[in-house]
Structures are given as C-alpha cells and as structure tokens.
Image (cartoon, rainbow, N blue to C red):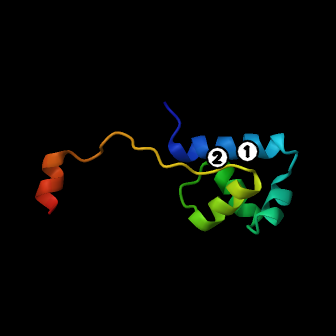
Amino acid sequence: MAANPYQILGSAVKQERKLHGLSQTELSHLSNTGINFISQLERGKETLRLSSLLSVLNVLGLELNIVRGKNLISTSDKLKSE
C-alpha cells in the first residue's frame, strides 16, 4: 500500500530533522511547538495545525508548495453542486 501524504510529509520532516542533528525536543523548542506535535507530525497523524507545520518547516529550511494534482471531482459533479 502506498504511503499517504501525511506519512510522506512526516518522513520528510523526520529525515530533515536528523540531517540538522536535532532531537524532536530541540525542534519543538525552536519551532515553538510541542514535542507531541513533532511526534505526531513525523508519524503522519492527519490532524495537524497548519501554523505549527509551517513553523517546523521554517526551522528546517523547508517550504510547502502547492502542486495541482488529479481532479478528485468530475466536472459534472461540480456542476451539480452549483
């Protein structure tokens, strides 16, 4: 089974944290988040606060990019909902 986007994000954050030689505790202090948030983020938990995520990414020198993906709703579904 393919990893979900939360797991992919969490793995990327964990890898980058380790490259910076930071513990989860150190990263939580630097990003003004809690240790539980860092742990949940790295495990791919789906309930994340965007402001906290952006703070962590900033500390690690990472950025969040929005990329257009596949349409999840067909055009006819969009028209029905309007």
As displayed, is residue 10 above or below residue 3?
Answer: below
Residue 43: x and y, percent? 65, 48
Instruction: Please tell me how many numbered marks the rendered image carries.
Output: 2
Residue 46: x and y, percent? 53, 55
The three-letter code of the residue at mark 2 reads: Gly
Residue drawn at x 76%, y 57% is: 59
As displayed, is residue 79 above or below residue 29?
Answer: above
> What residue is shown with label 2?
10
The three-letter code of the residue at mark 1 reads: Lys
Q: CA distance from mark 2 to mark 1?
A: 6 Å
Relative side of 9 to 5, left or right: right
Residue drawn at x 55%, y 47% is: 6
Q: Quadrant of the C terminus?
A: bottom left
* Dot 1 crowding, Cα within 10 Å, few <14, some 14–19, many 20+: many
SS for dot 1: helix
> What residue is shown with label 1?
14
Relative side of 2 to 33, left or right: left
Badge number at residue 63:
none
| Residue 49 in sight | no
As displayed, is residue 62 above or below residue 35?
Answer: above
Relative side of 24 to 81, left or right: right
Residue 58: x and y, percent? 71, 57
Where, by quadrant of the figure, is residue 72 drawn? top left
As displayed, is residue 22 above or below residue 29?
Answer: above
Q: Nearer the viewer, residue 5 or 51?
A: 51
Q: Are marks 2 and 1 in contact (CB under 8 Å)?
A: yes
Residue 28: x and y, percent? 79, 62
SS for dot 2: helix
